[in-house]
Image: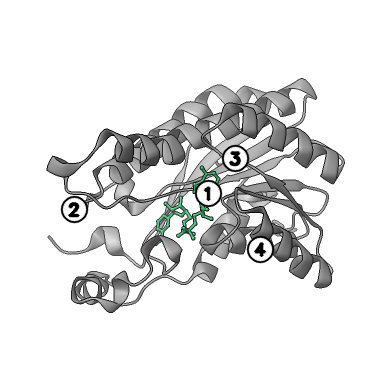
Amino acid sequence: MSLPSFRLDGRRALVTGASSGLGQHFAETLARAGAEVVLAARRTDRIQAEVERLQAAGLKAHCVAMDVTSAASVCEALAAAEAQSGGVIDILVNNAGVSGNSFFLNLEEEEWDFVVDTNLKGPYLVAREMAKRLVAVKQPGNIINIASILGFRVAAVLAPYCASKAGVIHLTKAMALELARYGIRVNAIAPGYIETEINAGYFDTEPGLKMIARIPMRRLGDRTDLDGPLLLLASEAGRYMTGSVIEVDGGHLCSTL
Ligand code: NAD
């Protein structure tokens, strides 16, 4: 009996929002598992520096400029990613995201559009472009959307964030339904709280510390806690998984009511 492999040799992966935090880490994890990775983000100076670091470590990495809210930018970036890596992208991590910080009564339309365009429209635009390219060459692939536990539960001052992440969870299932016939799997990871630029400083505050105390495992997540779920979904080990959402939160969604 042979055990499943989590290796990604011969695969080409693109990670959006790879200029910091989880996205930067996902790109390195996929590259260390053998994939050729393309880091996509708006801040090209940052991803270029990261590509140089990964290449110096003997990994295969490239970068492309991409604003996930712009269909034209997404299309150009996917074409550039194929040109650089020498073939169609067959793993997509839809990671780019923003949060917001307004009570609902003060929530301006600009903030709503900014958050929902980035977190929900963005994954749709990037996944559609990537899937079209895979279907055109009749190749299988897989898409991993980064949702959040706030797609299942809610927190104050984050209404568009919570709504967009709930949307990502349902979009994942709708895409899984339609893309399975083309051999494209679509799954999501719903992380709990992990310290990055998106929540910088919050965990030093009293509400932040109280929140950590409500996590059953009594600690924040570490970005490496997502490595196993990411590689499961990206590799052949997860070959019968589509439309699934993996919660990785130290039990936070099970916190006592
Ligand atoms: P982060 O702020 O470090 O990373 C988000 C990245 O997305 C940044 O690099 C940012 O530049 C990029 N981005 C934003 N708008 C973009 C656009 N229009 N085009 C391209 N890139 C864009 O924060 P993070 O914690 O690494 O967040 C990564 C993902 O994980 C997000 O989707 C976030 O919602 C999700 N998430 C994070 C946590 C957490 O606790 N850190 C928990 C659950 C889910």
**Colour style of the rendered protein structure:** one colour
Q: Which of the 4 quarters of the picture holds residue 186? A: top right
**Disc 4 packing (10 Å; few <14; some 14–19; many ≥20):** some
Residue under circle 4? 29
Q: Is disc 1's CB within 8 Å of ligand 1?
A: yes
Q: Residue at x 55, y 30 (%)?
A: 125
Kindly state the secondary structure of the residue where label 3 is placed. strand
Q: Which residue is mark 1?
A: 95
Q: Is mark 3 within 8 Å of ligand 1?
A: no
Q: Callout 2, which amino acid? A: Ala
Q: Amino acid at mark 4?
A: Thr
Residue 180 coordinates in the image, percent (x, y)? 60, 27
Q: Give the residue at mark 3.
A: 143
Cα distance in 3D space between marks 3 and 1: 11 Å
Identify which residue is drawn at 76% across, 41% down: 81
Nearest to N terminus: mark 2 or mark 1: 1
Element type at mark 2 = loop
- Look at label 3 and name its amino acid: Ile
**Tag nearer the camera, 2 or 4:** 2
Q: Which residue is labeled 2 in the image?
A: 156
In terms of depth relative to the viewer, which is nearer, 201 or 242? 201
Question: Given contact means CB atoms under 8 Å apart, are the residues at marks 2 and 1 in contact?
Answer: no
Q: Are marks 2 and 3 in contact (CB under 8 Å)?
A: no
> Which amino acid does the dot numbered 1 rest on?
Asn
User: Between disc 2 and disc 4, whose residue precedes?
Assistant: 4
